[in-house]
Image (cartoon, rainbow, N blue to C red):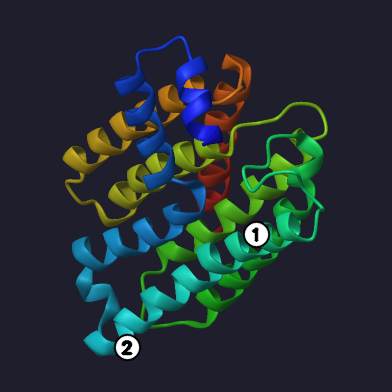
Amino acid sequence: MKDVAEMQENKQPLPLVIFAKIISYVFHPLFIPTYIFFFLMQQVPYEFAGITPWQLKMRLFGLFWLTAFFPAFAVFLLWRLKFSESIFLRTQKERIIPFVITMFFYWWMYYLSRNFTDQPIVLKFFFMGIFISTSVGLVFNNFIKISLHAMAAGGAAMAIILFSYYYQAPFGLFICIALILAGLICTSRLLVSDHTNAEIYYGLLVGAGCQLGAYFFVM
């Protein structure tokens, strides 16, 4: 009921607000690592040589479990235990603990990726990049409510660009799609959240910049 009230109060047309909310949910930051892993499964399947299709599906499920379900469940628990007023983490203070929890899981995925020899090596820099961006986001959170959606969108777009560079693969279409989606995600956050333009721009720069830095550091 609260979401409906917010839509009615929004000055934008209701269908546009609904569309923006759908984009925000479908491309939630917690889902991005799973999407990226699935993208690599489809585009560079030879990098998963030596692992059975069932094992690959289980690895995808395990990644979703660690990078999406557990962080989301932690936020739910914080809300139910009254440590936050909403599961949407509307204030900077409410975001501190979820930031730390998510950082732990991203660091763990990076640590695991260093030991797996039957998956793309580019996942090493990708997981390092999202771990660093979350750490930087925690620092920014002390000053502004940096957009987590923008961080994820910028990081994903830069990751696909770097995948194309590393594999020397013609990912032009996918890069265009990633950039368009990043624009849609950021526009959606401006429509249905209280983020400022600066918080969106900083999020994009942090997400993309950390992926680029991780690439040169890890690769």
Look at mark 2 in the image and give the residue it sits on.
Answer: 55
Label 1's element?
helix
- Residue 199 point in image, percent of width and height: 62, 23
Q: Residue furthest top?
A: 11
Q: Is residue 198 above or below residue 88?
A: above
Q: Is residue 197 above or below residue 31?
A: above
Residue 69 vs 28, above or below: the answer is below
Residue sitting at x 37%, y 46%: 26
Taking 91 as reference, is 39 left or right? left
Residue 217 visible somewhere in the drawing: no
**How packed is label 2: few (under 14 Cα within 10 Å), some, or many (20 or more)?**
few
* Three-letter amino acid code of the residue under disc 2: Gln
The x, y position of residue 85, in whole percent, is: 75, 44
Query: What is the quadrant of residue 89 in the picture?
Result: top right
Compare residues 22 and 102 and report the one nearer the observer.
Answer: 22
| Residue located at (78% from left, 39% from top) | 139
Q: Is residue 202 left or right of residue 164?
A: right
- The residue shown at (25%, 83%) is 49
Residue 101 appears in view: yes
Q: Nearer the viewer, residue 147 or 212?
A: 147
Residue identified by numbered label 1:
76
Closer to the chain start, of discs 1 and 2, is: 2
Within 10 Å of disc 1 (Cα), the crowding (few <14, some 14-19, many 20+) is: some
Q: Amino acid at mark 1?
A: Phe
